[in-house]
């Protein structure tokens, strides 16, 4: 019985197929909102799905000079990483499918897998745009990864647990956004960096390096990478909403809060000019990391003080 | 130096209709002077052929059957025309005009791009 | 053109087909990490043999041929050509025609600069500015359509005058459109000179000193953004510019921000000029009679296109077809500066530096 439900959880709901589709839906919401902000019409609701279906139907061309096996395997690994990460996250207001102490760290690393795979995919080809894109993607990964991690560990600190379900339970009803505003800011900007959304889209800046690391990908590989991005978006939004916005205990709260987060992200996308890669790195290490450390310090101090109070 | 200097624009856009024109379903009124396809009024045509000489795209062919009886055949290739209106300017008799309403000229068949007019032969 | 001994380095080819280029051109940037260490350019992909074709067509047909050298500054090309032919024939177009030519020139400059603003914002990765500036550009496109009958190739010029007249109704529409555009332009000027996220891509990037600008012979707004006062509309007024002199906008800074500021301020200047022309439009005929055969001789015709000085050479042997027509467009003058300025910058800055000169490859290749 439990095997059947596990398999269902893996393949259909909440992970698997349903997650893939909601990833596409969030991608659509992102594009449509951005279009509205820019006074455009934007894509129709099925456009991301249609894109993926089209890509899946197309031939996948492996260019000369690549490691063929790696070329095929990387998109699959990337998508698998993102989907596995989803298993530990309270998606759609449901309890995570799996949970163990310390799963927060595992989830975050699983989420990075996509970027890592894209980096390797770019480096795997001989294409110069891909190589530059891969370098940029990995550089960016190393710059936002630490601050993003620290920002998500802020709630973990106060919840005194490294297990997502426990942190979510602790954060439920508590708007940590108010007590840890800097952490929230870093988390949401980090998420944008992770998803390579403007202004952090230097790794795929089309006016410079065409499509960055994925320039040589077509057909199925590209579709899988895009699906992976969608999934990562949902998982990332869920994590930030669950930790900072008072929890996502039911599907309605989930939808509302993730969409509000998405809206904030779209506003930032609309207002900013693309950062150069050196500016991105500089920003994260000079401000992002320091700010989030300051946030930590404050949190720990407060925590210690309240502990002392409790004892005294 | 400040952040988000276009905040006003994007917040206004949230309640605005998109600026994109929904062309086939919604059509804007055609400007009066729009240069659509050519129309030829043979009544005053003298068959001087200046329109054909000056046409930069060789879109006009004029066949003079009988200059006295004013029998001309005018062939107009819509697909070659660049809609420059030089022929309208060149014609001293004012026989040529560009129809503002005929501007959706795409067609499935090449033959639809060929217009052939004949001046009404005078009786006999 | 080459600014580096290109040994076996990591080179990034850009073009002829590349998302940063709206037209075909080929660049090779050798990079060291993200820093550009050398650049070469190859042009000519959009060569259509227009100058040769002109020798086979009569003077009238050629107006429309040269109008099609460039899609953006089509009227400027036709004006340069017509003014040259009129000078050869010893004919002067009536004042009202000259004023209307000038009017359309300025309206075209408005549309060209707004287009450039959008393209450059897009190259910098600021798509919101791109979308808004192009939305507002529709205003001037509609005005041009109402005035001339077409959005792009206006075909206003004929030898010896113009085809279209300005009616009161159209004048009112232009006034109204300009009021809206003026307000928007002030807003954009404020955005490009104050938005922190935009300025970190534009301020101090791609600096061309005045001396460099003079040595490389750059023209137009690109030169004026480096403090070089160079404008044909003032130096050698043509059409009605002697009666309606514009003010030259210069900026000493020479960086990308200065180029944005100069072009946006030129927009404001164009609005003023258009209003002035409409208010003091001379009365009279639109055309004078032109001979079909042009007296033999040769002449040079210079006008200020939105991108800089446009130069036409015309030679006639007394027949109804030209012997030689040569057009030299502003882009070729400015292209050296791209190759020079790109070196030492980040790869990410290159598209913006290229866009900074407002390149028009098809103009350049003819
Ligand atoms: S509009 Fe121009 S191209 Fe068309 S037929 Fe007349 S002269 Fe020829
Ligand atoms: S220029 Fe006018 S009069 Fe002469 S042939 Fe053409 S239409 Fe007829």
Image: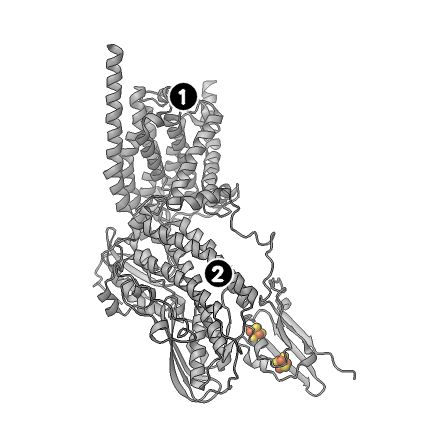
Q: Which residue is mark 2?
A: C140
Q: Which residue is mark 1?
A: A173
At 38% from the left and 68% from the top, the residue drawn is: C246
Residue B113, quarter of the rendered image: bottom right
Judging depth in this view, the residue of C249 and C22 nearest the camera is C249
Label 1 residue SS: loop
Question: Which image quarter is the C terminus of chain B in?
Answer: bottom right
Give the vertical position of C353 relative to A186 (above or below): below
The residues tagged by marks 1 and 2 sit, at their Cα atoms, a distance apart of: 54 Å
> In this rendering, does residue A66 appear at all?
no
Left or right for C150, reference C322? right
Q: Position of residue C262 (x, y in %)?
A: 33, 60
Judging depth in this view, the residue of A123 and C91 nearest the camera is C91
Where ligand 1 lies, by image quadrant? bottom right
Asked if marks 1 and 2 fall on the same chain, the answer is no
At 44% from the left and 51% from the top, the residue drawn is: C132
Left or right for A61, reference C139? left
Judging depth in this view, the residue of C153 and C40 nearest the camera is C153
Judging depth in this view, the residue of B96 and A4 nearest the camera is B96
Q: Position of residue A84 (x, y in %)?
A: 39, 30
**Whether the residue under disc 1 has CB within 8 Å of ligand 1:** no
């Amino acid at each position: 019985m439990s095997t059947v439900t596990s398999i269902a959880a893996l393949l259909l709901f909440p992970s698997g197929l349903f997650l893939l589709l909601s990833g596409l839906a969030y991608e659509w919401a992102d594009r449509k909102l951005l279009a509205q902000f820019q006074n455009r019409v934007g894509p129709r609701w099925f456009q991301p799905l249609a894109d993926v279906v089209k890509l899946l139907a197309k031939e996948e061309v492996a260019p000369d000079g690549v490691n063929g096996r790696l070329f095929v395997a990387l998109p699959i690994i990337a998508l698998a990483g993102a989907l596995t990460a989803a298993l530990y996250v309270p998606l759609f207001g449901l309890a995570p499918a799996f949970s163990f102490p310390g799963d927060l760290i595992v989830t975050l690393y699983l989420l990075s897998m996509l970027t890592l795979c894209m980096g390797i995919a770019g480096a795997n080809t001989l294409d110069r745009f891909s190589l530059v894109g891969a370098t940029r993607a990995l550089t960016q990964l190393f710059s936002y990864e630490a601050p993003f991690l620290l920002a998500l560990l802020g709630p973990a600190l106060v919840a005194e647990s490294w297990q997502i379900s426990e942190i979510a339970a602790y954060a439920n009803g508590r708007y940590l956004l108010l007590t840890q505003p800097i952490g929230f800011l870093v988390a949401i900007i980090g998420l944008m960096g992770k998803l390579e959304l403007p202004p952090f889209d230097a790794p795929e800046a089309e006016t410079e390096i065409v499509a960055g690391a994925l320039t040589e990908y077509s057909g199925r590989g590209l579709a899988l990478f895009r699906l992976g991005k969608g999934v990562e978006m949902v998982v990332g939004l869920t994590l930030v909403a669950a930790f900072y916005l008072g929890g996502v205990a039911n599907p309605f709260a989930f939808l509302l809060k993730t969409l509000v987060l998405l809206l904030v992200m779209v506003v930032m996308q609309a207002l900013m000019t693309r950062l150069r890669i050196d500016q991105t790195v500089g920003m994260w290490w000079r401000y992002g990391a320091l700010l989030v450390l300051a946030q930590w310090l404050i949190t720990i101090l407060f925590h210690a003080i309240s502990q002392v109070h409790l004892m005294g | 130096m400040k952040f988000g200097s276009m905040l006003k624009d994007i917040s206004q856009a949230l309640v605005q209709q998109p600026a994109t024109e929904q062309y086939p379903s919604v059509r804007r009124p055609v400007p009066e002077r729009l240069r659509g396809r050519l129309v030829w009024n043979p009544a005053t045509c003298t068959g001087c052929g200046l329109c054909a000489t000056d046409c930069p795209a060789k879109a006009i062919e004029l066949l003079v059957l009988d200059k006295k009886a004013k029998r001309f055949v005018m062939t107009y290739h819509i697909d070659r025309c660049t809609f420059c209106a030089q022929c309208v300017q060149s014609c001293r008799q004012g026989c040529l005009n560009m129809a503002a309403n005929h501007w959706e000229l795409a067609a499935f068949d090449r033959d639809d791009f060929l217009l052939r007019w004949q001046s009404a032969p005078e009786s006999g | 053109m080459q600014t580096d001994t290109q040994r076996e380095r990591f080179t990034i080819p850009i073009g002829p087909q590349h998302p940063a280029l709206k037209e075909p051109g080929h660049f090779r940037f050798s990079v060291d990490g993200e820093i550009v260490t050398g650049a070469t350019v190859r042009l000519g992909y959009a060569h259509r043999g227009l100058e040769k074709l002109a020798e086979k067509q009569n003077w009238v047909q050629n107006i429309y041929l040269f109008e099609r050298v460039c899609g953006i500054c089509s009227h400027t090309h036709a004006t340069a050509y017509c003014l040259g032919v009129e000078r050869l024939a010893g004919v002067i177009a009536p004042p009202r025609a000259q004023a209307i030519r000038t009017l359309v020139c300025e309206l075209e400059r408005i549309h060209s600069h707004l287009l450039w603003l959008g393209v450059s914002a897009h190259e910098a990765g600021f798509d919101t500015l791109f979308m808004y500036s192009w939305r507002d550009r529709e205003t001037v496109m509609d005005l041009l359509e109402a005035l001339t009958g077409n959005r792009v190739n206006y075909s206003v010029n004929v030898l010896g005058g113009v085809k279209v007249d300005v009616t009161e109704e159209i004048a009112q529409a232009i006034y109204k459109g300009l009021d809206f555009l003026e307000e928007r332009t002030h807003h954009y000027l404020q955005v490009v000179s104050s938005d922190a996220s935009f300025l970190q891509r534009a301020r101090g990037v791609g600096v061309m000193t005045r001396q460099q600008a003079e040595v490389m012979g750059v023209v137009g707004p690109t030169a004026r953004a480096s403090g070089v006062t160079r404008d044909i509309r003032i130096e050698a007024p043509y059409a009605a510019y002697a009666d309606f002199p514009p003010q030259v906008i210069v900026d000493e800074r020479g960086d990308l921000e200065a180029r944005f500021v100069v072009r946006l301020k030129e927009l404001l200047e164009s609005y003023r000029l258009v209003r002035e022309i409409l208010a003091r439009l001379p009365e009279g005929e639109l055309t004078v009679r032109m001979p079909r055969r042009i007296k033999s001789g040769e002449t040079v015709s210079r006008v200020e296109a939105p991108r800089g000085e446009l130069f036409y050479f015309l030679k006639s042997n007394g027949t109804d077809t030209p012997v030689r027509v040569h057009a030299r467009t502003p882009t070729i003058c400015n292209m050296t500066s791209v190759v020079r300025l790109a070196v030492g910058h980040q790869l990410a800055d290159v598209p913006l530096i290229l866009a900074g000169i407002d390149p028009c490859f098809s103009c350049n290749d003819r």
